[in-house]
Amino acid sequence: MNMDGIRGRLTPNRNLSELTWLRVGGAADYLFQPADIEDLALFLKQLDPTVPVFPMGVGSNLIVRDGGIRAVVIRLGRGFNSIEVDGDLVTAGAAALDAHVARKAADAGLDLTFLRTIPGAIGGAVRMNAGCYGSYVADVFVSATMVTRDGEICEISADDLSFQYRQTQLPEGAVLVSATLRAGLGDAADLHTRMKQQLETRDKTQPTKDRSAGSTFRNPAGFSSTGQSDDVHDLKAWKVIDDAGMRGASRGGAQMSEKHSNFLINKGGATAADLEGLGEEVRKKVYASSGITLMWEIMRIGEPQSE
């Protein structure tokens, strides 16, 4: 694949298992790590339009299947992780970690604390309308910059993305490169204290020391936990998984965590097929138990291993 004037790194047949939090998966046909937005735009403009493109963040919410991906995977790095504060606006590169954005905002007395415990980076948070404690990216979103599949740089609004619970309408092959969020005001010390408490609660209730990809399934009720004492649990994913007797269930090296049953973890040596297969088994058992069809929150991409 010859590309004129490209400054980023293009790697053929790149194994993706070491780039995902679950540490599974095969190789991408190519991995491209652009130097900056202009480099990304030039690359996409020159890339054969029939070649699929998959934008990949930090791999925190992703299962790459064992047979790999017949596509060019775009992974944004250091040229895309800036965080700038202007009044009540925070503009973050798509590769900026959610936790870093929450901390830098808090330093400036701006409340994006709900991002602190969300694994991953801002690009994925926008794309999935990430949420926690009853707050969502959609609540604070102002605009974003993306590069289209044909290499055009453009600004998009909330209307363009059509935010819904855990999803947006991003054009096929488009790559989010930055987002601007409007934050509420708060006292910096209070905001940091709140985030510290959120982390302590998370570590008590979630398997943060295990290899996981965050929540496995969307809550059937269609909204995130609020963290409040009056929060109802009837239609939380973990509750219907428990009711189906699948807490701690395992397949190969994959397990539904004993600590939080909506966390799929790699106990060691799991394949992508183990993880996805266990997830599908959970979905069947939950449907048989409650009539509820759980929707995956973890993205699964690529092809299974050929026999």
Image (cartoon, helix red, strand yellow):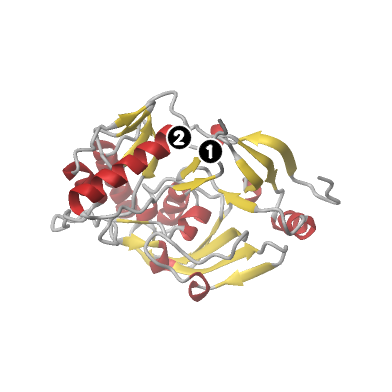
Q: Is residue 253 above or below residue 187?
A: above
Disc 1/disc 2 C-alpha distance (Å): 7 Å
Q: For the residue carrying disc 2, how many other residues have a C-alpha within 10 Å: few (<14), some (14-19), or many (20+)? A: many
Farthest top residue in view: 269
Q: What residue appears at the point 44 percent right and 56 percent down from the top-left corner?
A: 105
50 or 199: which is nearer to us? 50
Which mark sits nearer the N-terminus, 1 or 2? 2
36 displayed left or right of 15: right
Tag 1: amino acid:
Pro
Could you tell me residue 260's position as x and y percent? 26, 39
Q: Which mark is residue 72?
A: none
185 or 154: which is nearer to us? 154
Q: What residue appears at the point 46 percent right and 71 percent down from the top-left corner?
A: 162
Q: Which residue is mark 2?
A: 273
Q: What residue appears at the point 34 percent right and 35 percent down from the top-left corner?
A: 208
Tag 2: amino acid:
Ala
Residue 111 image-quadrant placement? bottom left
Residue 171 image-quadrant placement? bottom right
Could you tell me residue 35's position as x and y percent? 72, 48
Q: Secondary structure at mark 2?
A: helix
Could you tell me residue 177's position as x and y percent? 61, 58
Q: For the residue carrying disc 1, how many other residues have a C-alpha within 10 Å: few (<14), some (14-19), or many (20+)? A: some
Q: What residue appears at the point 19 percent right and 52 percent down from the top-left corner?
A: 290
Q: Secondary structure at mark 1?
A: loop
Q: Which mark is residue 304?
A: 1
137 displayed left or right of 241: right
Farthest bottom residue in view: 159
Residues at circles 1 and 2 in contact by the CB criterion of under 8 Å: yes
Whether residue 22 is visible to the viewer of this picture, yes or no, is no
89 or 38: which is nearer to us? 38
Q: Is residue 49 above or below residue 4?
A: below
